[in-house]
Amino acid sequence: MTEGSGRRRAWRWTGGFFEDASFGRALPERIHADIREQQFRSEIMVGIVQCAILVAFSLLYVFTPSSFTPDAPVRATPLGLSLFGILVLVRLWFAATDQLSRGILAFSVVAEMAVLMFTIWAYHLQFEAQPSLYLKSTALFYVFIIIALRSLRFDPLWVILSGLTAAVGWVALTVYALVTAPGNPITWDYVTYMASSQIHPGGEADKVLAIVMVTAILALALARGRRFLVQAVAQTQAAADLSRFFDRDVAERITGADMRAAAGHGELRNAAILFIDMRGFTKLSATLAPSDLIGVIGEYQRLLVPVVQSHGGNIDKFMGDGIMASFGAASPSDHYAADALRAVDAILAAAERWRAERAAAGKPAPGVGAAVAAGEVLFGVIGDENRLEYTVIGDAVNLAAKLEKHTKAEAVRALTTRDMLELAQRQGYAGAGAKRLLHQRDVAGVADPLDLAVLGERTVQ
């Protein structure tokens, strides 16, 4: 690799790094909105922490004996705390009323550090001493506190602005002390510097360097953290979107997995499979406008999906007017069969109410048919690298689909097998009354006759 190509690669890496850090990449507006909400909360947090620090320092000042004369021309600490408190409260008001623009925030960041520098400068007036006194003040440590507080917003810009203001302010304080000091104020002897009012240029340069280095390190850490924040917000939004296309348990399985989903991964489960179908859909398709048809399907799905989920079911897929759900496949369960039959009872009751309401309003009132089968299924990922799908595969899936079609032949609303009913009863299913049994029924696509149980008696055409 040539030197030129190395520089270009480094420049691209650096540019991309800070582009991410400043949210420069083209992100969807909803992600920007989420980030702005996080920034708003961060700014409120900064203000609250600053108020807590103000209260703590005010109490410390009140209960600490004074070390200056009562007639001192300036009381630096109360003045500085008052000015700082005003700035914090004004910025909090702007933030709480959603008026905190970047310009106002920049002014407040500079003003807060300027107030601290002014307070440090006023120490020599309070103690009626040479200006070099404030250069030895422990108040320098407060500079780092204010810079660090800016990191709570997760934006390196404000840390840099605060740190640069502090560095320029300390240089200005040093120059003022040098210019106003009588005689030769400079010494290069550390002991003399500590024991007298003379100034050690190297010591002051070390302080400025420390401010700059702490600022740079915090800004770099925040730039990295901000990049991860962008990724985290984007991934959180993606996971939220994903949960709308996948069932909740499946979405959590995908986003929480240690390894990426890949075709061919699956697990055997004992599960129940439910098929739900809207009756008379073909007739509706011929008589309703497309928008009205979609509206009916949307109503029907919004009605039944929560019922399935409230009984522990997972929506596997929508098939036009059909819904396929599983119980005990995405998440293993010891009562999957009982849950499935309870769901069927609730679905039939909800669908009947919905049908009656639509009929009373003079709207098309389709009915609902359902069927359930239980057995061992394979729950896993199918597809190729670019298009994957979580689904269930097995005889129970095929049988449930065939039984749903067979409900029309038997003129009933819902069916299951006798074996499934008995399994559900062993798992605690009581149901609403005794279920009528159909012995040795021939079901299209099934080789041997089956004993069936009727879950919903009334015929719906």
Image (spheres, rainbow, N blue to C red):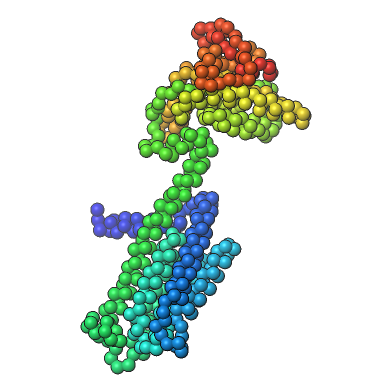
Q: Is residue 305 visible?
A: no
Give the residue drawn at x 38%, y 63%: 219
Nearest the eye: 444 or 130: 130
Nearest the eye: 126 or 212: 126
Left or right for 304, reference 265: right
Give the residue drawn at x 44%, y 52%: 230
Left or right for 368, reference 29: right
Can you tell which quarter of the image residue 372 is in?
Answer: top right
Q: On screen, 332 above or below 22?
A: above
Q: At which x and y percent is residue 425?
A: 54, 18
Q: Is residue 31 visible?
A: yes
Q: At which x and y percent is residue 291?
A: 67, 34
Left or right for 150, reference 198: right
Can you tell which quarter of the image residue 161 is in?
Answer: bottom left
Q: At which x and y percent is residue 114?
A: 45, 76
Q: On screen, 417 above or below 382?
A: above
Give the residue drawn at x 66%, y 16%: 457
Nearest the eye: 269 or 427: 427
